Image: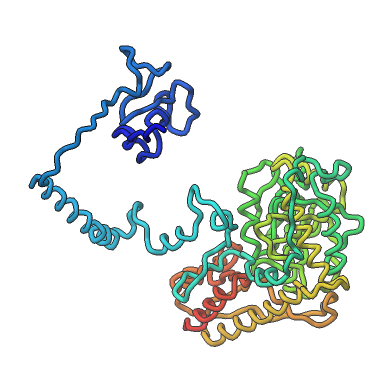
Amino acid sequence: MAAPRRRTSAELQVNGGLMPPSAHVIASSRGGSGGGAPSREDHAVTTNGGGPAHRGGKQRGGSSACSATKVSGRRRPAGRMPLWRVFIFASVALNVAALPLLLHQYIVSHPHHPGVVSPDQQQHHAYAPQPGTSGAAASAPSTGKPAVTTDSVINLDHGDPTMFEAFWRETGDAAELVIPGWQTMSYFSDVGNVCWFMEPLFDQQVRRLHRTVGNAAVDGYHVLVGTGSTQLFMAALYALSPADANQPTSVVSTAPYYSSYPAVTDFLRSGLFRWAGDANSFVGDSYIELVCSPNNPDGAIRDAVLSSGAGKAVHDLAYYWPQYTPITRRADHDIMLFTVSKSTGHAGTRIGWALVKDREVARRMTKFVELNTIGVSKDSQLRAAKVLSAVSDGYDGGASRHRLFDFGRRKMVERWRMLREAAAASGAFSLPEETSGRCNFANETAANNPAFAWLRCDREDVEDCAGFLRGHKILTRSGNQFGADPRYVRVSMLDRDDAYDIFISRLASLK
């Protein structure tokens, strides 16, 4: 048996001795920037850090590529290290030891430099998946806003409905869904339906839930699906605006109105419609009136204030659910908008729906969604259908003990009690009077507990309530964005318990 071959110095210098020189392949930067697909000519074989090997394995002069590095068996005799090397080594060691101290001093003196990562950012990045990672940590879904502490800024500007997470954590697999890789691949869902991209199961579960709750009529209505109710609001404006009109159709709503109405209406500067402000001050016969009930931001129950043969109304009923307000009647308006964001809390699913009486209006609204996004995610529709089914199962005599609206009602009653007590303890704020009504769904009298609080700052020295609260690390939305007095703010009541509890404690301490 032949004796094992001794490794040469060239082999030991390539990949730490794990690969022979002829197998160490790198991509040349010639011909473009990094990341492009290399051609055969861009590959090279290197030995001992040398130049590229040539095709055929030969260098100029006929030598083998692997002979480019001479191998010598002689070694430098052991001896004393020269004094100059000792000084260099000591200098490098001292500089490396001092580097952390210098970096710390730079961070302290330059906290806002773009290259400086703060401790908060370090904590955030510690939990964020890094490029190239794998496993549960890299594939875990986001959890929305980060956890808060008593010193955190409490952001209640948006109606992010994370309050409902606690309910859905307890439902087990009732709302879980597995979608095979081959499913939901086509653009089309039900070509015989006006809304041809809507999944039949979603249509079925929307109708079932409304029949269970009794908050809206569904018989004789077309169900349309959209990417949130905002897309369907835009679709309704498109469908109701005459294409041959001499001027854009006026869009109005009674103040205080939802702050997104004017922003969305005028965002694309459409020639079909334009924002015209408060419905109470509008003069004219042709208009589209937006009726939000219960109203965002103040929770009031609203009806249309304008009446004209040429006028149209769109009813935004996103909050007409038992956890927020008594269900006093089965709404049967021409166009009604709903969303899973506020009904079940699944804002990230981005699904809304419309109930539309007129087939031609439904067809035009569907056309808008088709032109805007070529339909709506089927995966989101199927998830929403599963969620709506789980909600209905809790009330349809099934075995489910999980009842979303009961959970939501308890939470909202408790939160409104806490808010009213905090406002009274402070003495600097006031809230609308509590109202109640007979709820046909719960079969009892129930209070109105809106998803938002319309909070007024009563201090004489405060004219900008949002700015005042911002100074105390509470973010809200100013009343001037709703066409109202800036002494009012809208406060979301739907955040997680930890954030809401800190908000209540902080508000009560403000005098």
Question: Residue 239: horizontal and vertical position, in percent?
Answer: 77, 46
Q: Residue at x 53, y 67 (%)?
A: 155
**Any part of residue 378 in sight:** yes
Q: Is residue 309 above or below residue 371?
A: below
Could you tell me residue 218's position as x and y percent? 88, 59
Apparent side of residue 123 relative to residue 194 in the rendered image (left or right):
left
| Residue 299 visible to the viewer | no
Q: Quadrant of residue 243?
A: top right
Residue positioned most to the front: 1
Q: Nearer the viewer, residue 37 or 349?
A: 37
Q: Is residue 16 left or right of residue 73?
A: right
Towards the viewer: 138 or 258: 138
Q: Which residue is rendered at x = 84% and y = 75% of the image?
A: 441
Quadrant of residue 369 within the rendered picture: top right
Q: Exactly how many numbered labels are in the figure?
A: 0
Q: Residue furthest top?
A: 61
Asked if 444 appears above or below 302 in the picture, the reply is: below
Residue 333 location (% of width, % of height)? 84, 60
* The N terminus - image quarter: top left
Residue at the farthest right position: 220
The picture quadrant where one finds residue 144 is bottom right
* Rendered location of residue 342, percent (x, y): 70, 65
In this rendering, the answer to whether 270 lies above or below 98 is above
Question: 42 and 447: which one is in front?
Answer: 42
Q: Nearer the viewer, residue 122 or 233?
A: 122
Q: Does residue 16 sit above or below 388 in this rendering? A: above
Task: Judge from the rendering whether residue 352 lies leftward or rightward of residue 111; answer left or right.
Answer: right
Is 12 left, or right, of 74 in this rendering? right
- At 16% from the left and 50% from the top, the residue drawn is 89
Residue depicted at 10% across the width and 46% down the height: 80
